[in-house]
Each structure stands twice: as C-alpha cells, then as structure tokens.
Image: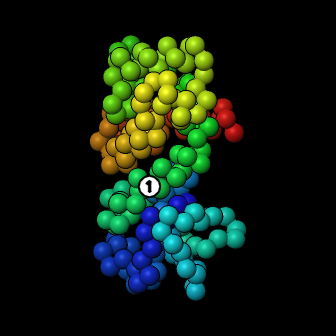
Amino acid sequence: MVVLDYMELGNPSDRHFEHRNQPLVQGVGTKYFTLLEANPLPAVRIDILEKVELGYPSKVKRVMQIYYDDLTSMAKANLPEALKMILNENERVFVEFFNIADPVNIRLHALELLPGIGKKTMRLILDERATRRFESFEDIKQRVKVEPVKILIERLLKEFVGGEKYYLFLKPKEKDAIYLRYLERLYGEIL
C-alpha cells in the first residue's frame, strides 16, 4: 500500500471508535487500488507516499478496507500522486490496457470512458495499436498525443468517487453499475 495520510494521534472524525485516539494510516493498495486504513506498529514512523508492505513483516496491523468518503482531506489530496507512483511502477500492465481495450457495447468503446478520449482519439488509438502494440506510456504519448498517466489517474479518481455507469478498474459500490474487470484481465494476461 502507498500511504496517503499518517495521523499520529488518530482521526477524531473516524466512524470507527478505535481509530479516534490511536495512530492511523490511510493508503491505497498497489494492485487493485483498494483504499485501506490501518494502525501502525508502536514506535514505527511512516511517511506520506511511502510504500508499506501488508504481508509479513509489516509496519502496520489491523488493515481494513474503506471508501473514498472515509479518506481525510490530506489523503484525498495525496491520492493523485500515489496513483501516479503506482501507474509508473506498473507501466507495462497499464500500457497493456491500451492494447486490449475493447467495445463495451455497439455504441461505446472502453477507451471512450477515459477522460478526454472521444471518437476521433479512440479511432487513432485503435489504428495505431493495429499497426504496432504500444510499448510504454511514452510510446502512447508520441503516437497518439495523449497523456496516458494523466487520463488514467482522472478515470481512477472518477471511479473512487462513484456514480459512474461503467467501471473499468475498480469494483463499484453501486449495485446497478457495470464492472468491466480490466484489472483482473490485465493481471491475468501480464503477470
């Protein structure tokens, strides 16, 4: 997990009583972008945007999933930078999204769900990937003239907030939303 906020004295506005008066860490998972809250181990210093392992040995205990609304304002402010770190670390996986994205239905392509990508840009991406697979974010930027990291971050933030009809990467809270499971597909094909 990448740490979004570290509250040494706890979070007085937390809905969980036990988090109100003991140290608390909020973060985002590095594989499926799960928002997490945990208690740091005693005498352990954790920095914001530090990558903390959740398996043994770990600097945190009692890890639990939370929602975007549970994040502190500091955590929300650090989320885009943390997402950028995760996307750059897993560049190969997310470049593959541009290579495998397919139509959602007859009228809508998964690429069109990304902010700033309309029919023209989608067609350009499809033509370019038919010529040759994308190799890196820089390759996408050069050939298609879009900022792939920026638009992926914007899409992920929209999915964190909720209210979308289609979810490319995150499992939706809403029962009627359509989850397209791209992260599972990407990790299944790449790793």
**Residue 100 picture quarter:** top right
Which residue corresponds to the image point at 38% horizontal and 32% vertical from the top-left?
Answer: 114
Indicate the secondary structure of the residue bearing disc 1.
helix
Front-most of residues 89 and 15:
89
Query: Vertically, is 23 above or below 48?
Result: below
Q: Position of residue 167 (x, y in %)?
A: 41, 36
Front-most of residues 15 and 38:
38
Q: Position of residue 160 (x, y in %)?
A: 38, 48
Task: Answer whether residue 104 is visible to the viewer in this image.
Answer: no
Front-most of residues 183 and 49:
49
Which residue corresponds to the image point at 47% horizontal and 56% vertical from the top-left?
Answer: 82
**Residue 96 picture quarter:** top right
**Residue 44 picture quarter:** bottom right
Query: Vertically, is 109 above or below 161?
Result: above
Horizontally, residue 139 falls left or right of residue 168, namely right
Task: Answer whether residue 143 is visible to the viewer in this image.
Answer: yes
Which residue corresponds to the image point at 46% horizontal and 41% vertical from the top-left?
Answer: 149
Which residue corresponds to the image point at 62% horizontal and 37% vertical from the top-left?
Answer: 92
Mark 1, Cα crowd under 10 Å, few <14 / some 14-19 / many 20+, is: some
Is the image coloured rainbow, by chain, by secondary structure, or in one colour?
rainbow
Which corner quadrant holds the N terminus?
bottom right
**Residue type marked 1:** Glu
User: Disc 1 marks which residue?
Assistant: 81
Q: Position of residue 130 (x, y in %)?
A: 56, 14
Across the whole image, how many numbered discs are drawn on residues? 1
Which corner quadrant holds the C terminus?
top right
Q: Position of residue 12 (x, y in %)?
A: 32, 79
